[in-house]
Amino acid sequence: MEEARVTSLRRKATNHAFTTIAALALLLALVPLVGVTLYVLQQGAPALSWDFLTQVPKGSDDPTSGIGPALQGTLVLTLLAAAIGVPLGIAAGAWLAEHGRNKWGDAFRLLLDSMAATPSIVMGLFVFAVVVISTGHFSAMAGGLALGLMVVPVVARTTEVALRAVPDPLREAGIALGATHARTLVKVTLPAAGSGIVTGAILALARVAGETAPLLFTALYSAYWMRGFDKPIAALSTFIYQFYRDPTPALRQQAWGAAFVLFVAVFGANVLVRILTHARSRQP
Amino acid sequence: MNTIIESRDLKVRFGSKEVLHGITLAVPANEVTAVIGPSGCGKSTFLRALNLMHDLTPTARIEGKVVFGGKDIYAPDVDPVDIRRRIGMVFQKPNPFPTMSIFENVAFGPRLLGLSRSDVRERVEESLKRAVIWDETKDRLKSPATDLSGGQQQRVCIARALAVKPDVLLLDEPTSALDPIATAKIEDLLDELKKDVTMIIVTHNMQQAARASDNTAYFLNGDLVEYGPTQKLFENPKDERTEAYITGRFG
Amino acid sequence: MERSFHKDIDELTARVEQMAQLSRSSVDEGVNAFAALDLNAARRVIARNMEINRADVDIEARALDLIALHQPMAKDIRTLGACLKIITYLDRIGRYGYDIAKATLALEGKAHVKKIVGIPVMRDKALGLLDESIAAFRERDATKARLVQPADDEVDALYDQVFRECLTYMIEEPRNITQCTQYILVARHLERVGDNAGKIAEKTIYMVTGERRPTTDP
């Protein structure tokens, strides 16, 4: 009897010890995360103002200096990336889901995974070599292409997963009604996988919105509002790159402000995805 | 007996395994024919062979014929899309298209056929009425089909299948996921619908076959053991294997 | 695979056989009492009728329970259906035994007119048919059951004979009328026992083969 009591006490103690260690590990992991967030917010907040968001950069001390073009640039580049990468990614994902359960599918998946693992700077270099050199100038188009290529593998994989998750009876119901495979894919399967595909796309785009390296050799940078798809363009990430070690504190401040905006945008996209996912899972 | 569809020595293989061993069965028009048998006996495989659903399975190999409308549906010059319009299917678990409203679900088939907007609307109403679910849905046609209860969803699926005006309707355990009241409603429905549409229903519930069908076929291990009028098969089966199954002496 | 439900059916048919024995002995002892004009024996037969009624009600209830709970098919439902009809026939047979006992009491204080030769022979033949049909039921033997009905013709013929004999006696001597009337009634009851035995055989054939051909004359 005594033995049993002792063992059970020991067990409880061990349990508590491990729980405590796990909690401490969690806190340890959270520290840098929370630290970064708070630091960015703290550093960047003072820079914020309506002017900041809408005005062009004006040089050292002009208080009406702003990141307007950078904001515009990030939006444009993200949209370009979406226009190029999302349709291609969905098409690739659809092929993989419907016809890719074989050696060819595995090979293609390997290719996509390699693409996803490619360092972003290499992607930028590729687009530089292929587009910038042949066209002779840096451009928003090139930047959008570089980001788009980075979006493709992620969207393809999430699309494949989302389509695979569509239960077979749904496809069968479409076929049994006399729809061809193509019609069923477009009208039944893709819509059913819809929210999964959308969240995948949003996450992919949120990630590339903050990329810097690929833009350095493609979109370059500009201090002005967008002047054309064939011209260089600003972006929040390249803006930060420009000013992060500027001797002028005011400009460094602006870099932090840009970081703040970027951070909030990416964070917001992730929250949006969470909301959409929850809404989907609450359906009967 | 007026045969509407029949299989002749139908064999189905998945890879190297033969699952149906030469089934010859003639289904009479405008009657309900039930297919019963223990799990794995091949009844669902048989049903799916009737509307070319095995095309979706790459390892499936079919031998023999299924004759419908005077032609073998497995002949190379037959259009599977046309066959599937004329031989519809309702599945075990109600599966309305989740992103579409009730109206859109039922309109799916007619739209595929290219009917005009007003014809589609008429067809949807007619089909929902035939499936005895019009009253419950007429005021919420635009709401998602997934908002309905299981039994209602299944009737919408039946309406959806009816909307292309098939000659034959194949039902694969249509009520096994439903409660007894919903089940009873659908069984009554079968009796009404058979006037226009021949029904073939696979069921693991013998009492359902006994209640709701005119003819019953008993499958065992990929063979057709016995086939005849339901009343005779359940009161005095000819084959002792049938007797063993329906009296529960074979578990 | 035997399920408990199938054991229940077997138990039910055993009860039917037991009831058959009760009914049989009612007829047998009833005729013995009549022949010996043994009033006490007759009263015992009369009392036993309650047991037979109870068996009828009990078996019917059990059969209906099995049907409601288990939705039997094929041979099982035919067996239960046959049992339900057979207990009705057995109840009637028991009732005839009771009526024969009552006839005994009706002759209290009187003596027999003649050796009532026809009646014991009729009893032997009718109970023989009953034994044959119950044996066929117990053994689930349709061939045996098919032999019962033709044999019933003999019992019918014997009844005609007794009837004619009694008429003769009554015309000869009007003081015989009381006894002879009872003889005719008793013979009639025994003829009906034969008929019901034939019906039991009919139901046995249905139980075993599913055939429904009437084998007794309406």
Image (cartoon, rainbow, N blue to C red):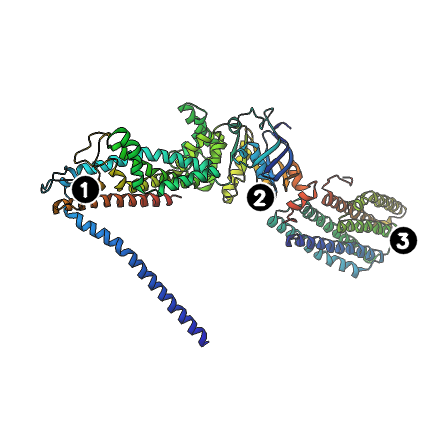
- C86 shown above or below A93: below
Marked residue chain, label 2: B
Residue in the foreground of this view, choosing between A84 and A110: A110
3 or 1: mark nearer the eye: 1
Q: Identify the residue under disc 3.
A: C115
A72 or A164, nearer to the observer: A72
Give the spatial CA distance, label 3 vs label 1: 139 Å
- Residue position for label 1: A242
Q: Assess disc 2: are there few (<14), some (14-19) or many (≥20) residues with their C-alpha within 10 Å of its C-alpha.
A: some
Mark 3: secondary structure = loop
Q: Is residue B210 left or right of residue A148?
A: right
Q: Amino acid at mark 3?
A: Lys
| Amino acid on which the number 2 mark rests in the picture | Asn
Figure check: A260 above or below B31: below
Q: Position of residue A193 (x, y in %)?
A: 40, 38
Q: Which residue corresponds to the image point at 58% horizontal and 43% vertical from the top-left?
A: B204
Q: Position of residue A31 (x, y in %)?
A: 26, 56
Label 3 vs label 2, nearer the camera: 2
Mark 2 sits on what residue? B205
Q: Secondary structure at mark 1?
A: helix
Q: Give the chain letter at badge 3.
A: C
Query: Which chain is disc 1 placed on?
Result: A
Instruction: Looking at this view, name the residue that lies furthest to the bottom.
Output: A2
**Separation of marks 1 and 2 at Cα, in angstroms:** 74 Å
Indicate left or right for A70 with C179 as reference. Answer: left
Which quadrant holds residue A234?
A: top left
Residue at 20% in and 38% down? A70
**Percent of width and height locating residue A154:** 36, 40
* Residue C72 numbered mark, or none: none
Residue B58 visible within the image: yes
